[in-house]
Image (cartoon, rainbow, N blue to C red):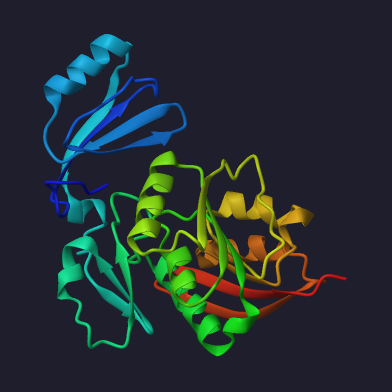
Amino acid sequence: MLKPPYTHYDQLFVYNFDRIDLGLIDDPDLIGTWIEDDTAILFFHEEKQKLVESICQRSGAKILYEANLNYQDWEAGLDITTFSVPPLIVAPLWEVDQLTDTTKDIPIYLDPSVIFGSGFHPTTRLCLQVITDMLSSGPEEIQTMVDLGTGTGLLSLGAAKLGVKQIRAYDNNPFACSVADKNVDLNSCGKQIQVMETDLRGALPDTNVDLVVANLYRGLLLDFFQNPDFWNARYYIISGFIPSMEEELLAALPMNQLKLLERRKSDTWRLWLLANSPA
């Protein structure tokens, strides 16, 4: 995450360790620690070879790989900049000063860090667009929401800014949860959004809400689809898959209680909006 003296991301120095028990790492250039299975990936603004050697010596860890790359390369070559999904306008922290008070758009201030969900991936943008469409046409229908795989928290923030009163945002990545919490605070949405660290592969959150947003990978979607406890919400936004996966995913849906309201696409990615009518 961004903290003084840093105001933006430029070069990323990445170190992947073969374990997660590295001890306390208090360094002003640390962006954050990404836990992936039994490994830890540390992101820094500056080169940290001596610090890395010290971590290895005291913890017994080994380096699996290290990299130095530009932030734009980390974001798949994209320049993370302000964009609009009316009535929302999403601004990374380094461009917040460029927003004017005369705009009628509703601002979201975002520290994208190195977490999925900056809004530039097609599935994130698709989900945000559907959320804005739903809440613009009938906001009274959507008062509660669950966001599965929240990442930066952007989709929850968009829903909160448009009036959803209670949102539970889940992610299994502690770094993502920290970034999402920061973004919730930046946007003064703490009364509406609760960020929760949960391994979605092993624990299904309560889905008795108006809207579930699941922008996830195919395997986890299949697991959810086959779990009757997943189908308790009124509406579902499902994304994170490509056309070649649709047949298998469709076959796993309990279509006796669901109605496919809309199907959208962006690049090679797809999204479904489903309505639930349980017996």
- Relative to 133, say whether 151 is above or below: above
Which residue occupies 27% across, 47% down?
1
- Relative to 194, say whether 68 is above or below: above
Q: Judge left or right: residue 171 versus residue 259.
A: left
Q: Judge left or right: residue 197 versus residue 235.
A: left
- Relative to 39, say whether 170 is above or below: below
Which residue occupies 47% across, 77% down?
162
- Relative to 138, say whether 66 is above or below: above
Q: Who is closer to the viewer here, 189 or 277?
A: 189
Q: Who is closer to the viewer here, 206 or 68?
A: 206
State which quadrant residue 165 falls in. bottom right
Q: Judge left or right: residue 23 versus residue 15.
A: right
Q: Judge left or right: residue 68 versus residue 23.
A: left
Which residue occupies 26% across, 56% down?
75
Q: Who is closer to the viewer here, 47 or 160?
A: 160
Which residue occupies 19% across, 52% down?
71
Q: Residue 204: x percent and y percent?
A: 67, 48
Q: Residue 101: x percent and y percent?
A: 22, 83
Residue at the far right in the pictured view: 279
